[in-house]
Image (cartoon, helix red, strand yellow):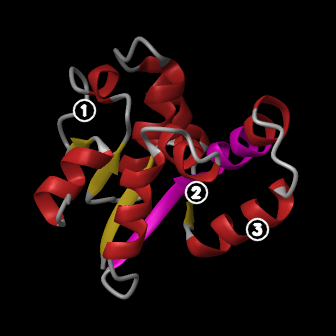
Amino acid sequence: MVKVFLDTDVSIDFLAFRQGYYEHMKKILLRFDTSTYSFMISESSVSNLIYILSNTYKIDNVNELLIEWIEGCKIASTAKSVILKALRSPFKDKEDACQYFVALHNDVDYFITRNKKDYAPYASIIPVYTPHEFLALFGSDD
């Protein structure tokens, strides 16, 4: 099973139908067979998604949307030691550090984010791709 970690930003792109970003995530989710690929989000992403989709995007059916999303994704667990590693890491953005170290702790194969530049200097163990790059490398981006 290939484990793919989805950063909060790409989850929001998909769930909020963000113009210019939604389509790449839709293609990824439709093209990659769930018997081969497992998509994962962090526990902290769940609360962020609830807040952002409810308060920023004011999505009417947010509960149903999130239930469907969470049922389709694996939830990456974390531990105190993972959070401490993230806080002690050289990442400038500690929320990004938490996401990356949770992914690392859960032995993912790939990390997808639209915010690749903030991960690139520090992320050397897990390959980090934008949705567009992931499609270009592992799927088809037509």
**Residue type at the position of mark 2:** Ser
Q: Which label lies toward us, 3 or 2?
A: 3
**Residue type at the position of mark 3:** Ile
Residue at image coords 59%, 47%: 17
Q: Which residue is mark 1?
A: 123
Q: Marks 2/1: CA distance?
A: 19 Å
Q: Nearer the viewer, residue 132 or 118?
A: 132
Q: Residues within 10 Å of mark 1 (few under 14, many from 20)?
A: some
Residue 74, position as x, y percentages in the image: 55, 68
Q: Earlier in the sequence, mark 3 or mark 1?
A: 3
Q: Quadrant of the C terminus?
A: bottom left
Which stretch appears magenta?
37-50
Residue with the most extreme top position: 92
Instruction: State yes or no: residue 69 in magenta.
Output: no
Q: Which residue is mark 3?
A: 67
Residue 124, position as x, y percentages in the image: 17, 35
Q: Earlier in the sequence, mark 2 or mark 1?
A: 2
Q: Marks 3/1: CA distance?
A: 30 Å
Q: Earlier in the sequence, mark 3 or mark 2?
A: 3
Which label is found at residue 77? 2
Residue at image coords 32%, 74%: 31
